[in-house]
Image: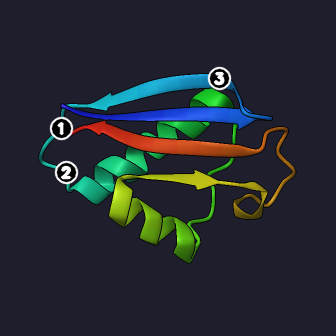
Amino acid sequence: MFRMWGKLTKSGKVLRDIIVSDHDYTKSRTEMVFHALEEICYAFDLEKPIWLDANVQEFKRRSRTRFGQDSFIEHVPFDYLEIQVIEE
């Protein structure tokens, strides 16, 4: 089972978090990641963040990344959205 953890953090404290699961292994890992991120953003009522080069590189290395204000077009009331693959 593929699972991704998403959390909103402000001033070092977790404001909200969610774990999203996907059992459809006919999808590629990339499709699972994008689908999970879409579900996380929907649950938090956020627009989808822009993947900057730093996000892509960090996610490739560590299976986790943080999206700060620079990844969103609108102002967001938190410091960052962090996503992390916790099970594949």
Residue 34, percent across and down?
Answer: 41, 52
Q: Is residue 13 left or right of residue 5?
A: right
Of the residues tagged 2 and 3, which is closer to the observer? 3
Say whether marks 2 and 3 touch (CB < 8 Å).
no
Three-letter code for the amino acid on which mark 1 is drawn: Asp
Q: Which structural element holds mark 2?
A: loop
Residue 35, compared with residue 40, is above or below; it is below
The residue tagged 2 is 27
* Residue 64 position in % (x across, y down): 43, 50
Residue 58 against residue 34 in the figure, above or below: below
Mark 1 = which residue? 24
Amino acid beneath label 2: Lys
Mark sitting earlier along the chain (2/3): 3
Dot 1: what SS?
loop
Please give the name of the residue rendered at 59% of the width and 27% of the height, measured from the top-left corner.
Answer: 43
Indicate the position of residue 72 as horizontal and vertical percent values. 74, 58
